[in-house]
Image (cartoon, rainbow, N blue to C red):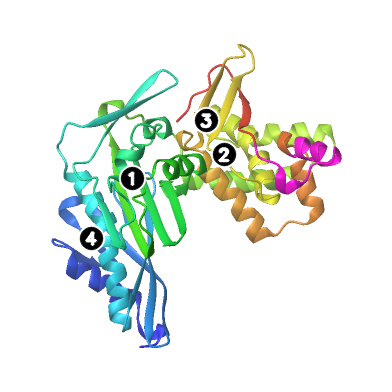
Amino acid sequence: MANNEYTENDALRLLAEKTEGSRIENDTMIIPDEGLAVSIKLVKCQEHNGNFSSQVIFFIEHELFDQPLVESCAGIGKSADEAVGRAVENFCASVMLSVRSALKCDGDEYISTTLMGKEHIFHVPCFTGTMGMGGQFLGNTNLWGLVKDVIPSYLGCKRTYWVKLFAAMVGDNITCEVRINGVVYHGLTELFRERLPLNGEKTEYGIYKAFVVLIQKEETYIPCPYKAEEVTGLTIAAIEKLKTVHDQESHSKALQDIFSSAPVESLGWEMVGLIPELYCMMVLNLNENDGLMYFKRESKETEYIKTSQLRSYDPIARGVYTYITQRKPSKEENLAVLGSSSLFNSVHKAILDGAKLDDLRCTDIMYSVGEDYKIY
């Protein structure tokens, strides 16, 4: 079967057949009793040397999710049906099982984090199991147990966080990844790699994957006064302002306009502080760290936080990426924006002193805030 003969509706129908209590409405599978909605994007389903491979992206929505939960699953088979079916089975056995378990679980295991003096408590689902495929190269397959002690430091104010843990071996090569709400955290990934309990076995192909959904208790959750899509749009508009900067006066005006455009003051501080630095990191392709530090201008109070704890960080990064890839700014426009970046000034000085760009490592971004600053 050719790729264009297999549709997303075919894949969605396969998913509905495997999901008890579901039905399809308007190109979406819904589970009414659980408030879940799943849509699908079929990225590819193609034939090569008599075998078929598929890649399917699943989007899960629920009222407790600040953003859709997105996961890509692959499948291989002797037909298009089998290849997509394997991708759907992969999704059901890992992500769907974990999400439904978290929503139904009434266990008493919790983890908590404290941010700006406020405690946020999250329910750990009853099911935190690991799915394995292919050869076995780990002595202990409890992936969640490897990182659950450090996960609280990555949790913030959002109602729901989902943690994906992935480890694969192909020959002598081991690949690891830890994602929180779809974003890879490099420091956490390296810690996960260091803690992997390898059993010394070699395998041509082996995969372990765990998916853990953490839902914050109602009594510790504080709603956010803005939406992620709003922040992304404001970010793109902010870059348009920064690219016109040509002197100190226009620079000050652009920053004030960006600050004033935010629906709340705290977001204004974050946009002014983060947009130029993230722009620099993406234009120069610098490695991203897991951490940030804010400091209050008057009291000089500082606090180190993870980027995952700052609700605006991902939508700001998304806005910067969207602007660079879609607007394709000129060199002059890039330099105008980069003129507001402390990181760019440091990189420029290091290169003038003889350093090579490939050898430079990005430090944690520091941004200034007012005394009434809040993290949402």
Residues at marks 2 and 1, CA–CA distance in whole angstroms: 25 Å
Which SS type dominates the magenta stretch?
A: helix
Tags 3 and 2 touching, CB below 8 Å: no
Query: How many numbered markers are drawn?
Result: 4
Q: Residues within 10 Å of mark 2 (few under 14, many from 20)?
A: some
- Give the x, y percent position of residue 210: 31, 50
Q: Which mark's residue is nearer the viewer, 4 or 3?
A: 4
Residue beneath disc 4: 30
Q: Which mark is residue 264?
A: 3
Q: Are marks 4 and 2 in contact (CB under 8 Å)?
A: no
Residue found 75% across the figure and 33% down from its top: 253
Mark 3 vs mark 2: in front:
2
Disc 1 marks which amino acid? Phe
Task: Indicate the amino acid at tag 3.
Answer: Val
What is the secondary structure assignment of the residue under circle 2?
A: loop
Q: Earlier in the sequence, mark 4 or mark 3?
A: 4
- Mark 4 nearby-residue class (10 Å; few <14, some 14–19, many ≥20): many
**Vertical arrangement, residue 166 with respect to residue 295, above or below:** below
Query: On the image, numbered disc 2 is attached to which residue?
Result: 289
Question: What type is the residue that disc 4 sits on?
Answer: Ile
Q: Which sits earlier in the primary sequence, circle 3 or circle 1?
A: 1
* Mark 4 vs 1: CB contact within 8 A: no
Q: Is residue 181 above or below residue 159?
A: below
Residue 359 counted in the magenta span = yes
Name the residue at 39% across, 53% down. Answer: 167
- In this rendering, which labeled residue sits more in front, label 2 or label 1? 2
Residue 45 seen by the camera: yes
Residue 180 location in percent, x, y? 41, 44
Residue stretch rendered in magenta on the structure: 344-362
Residue positioned 28% across, 46% down in the render: 140
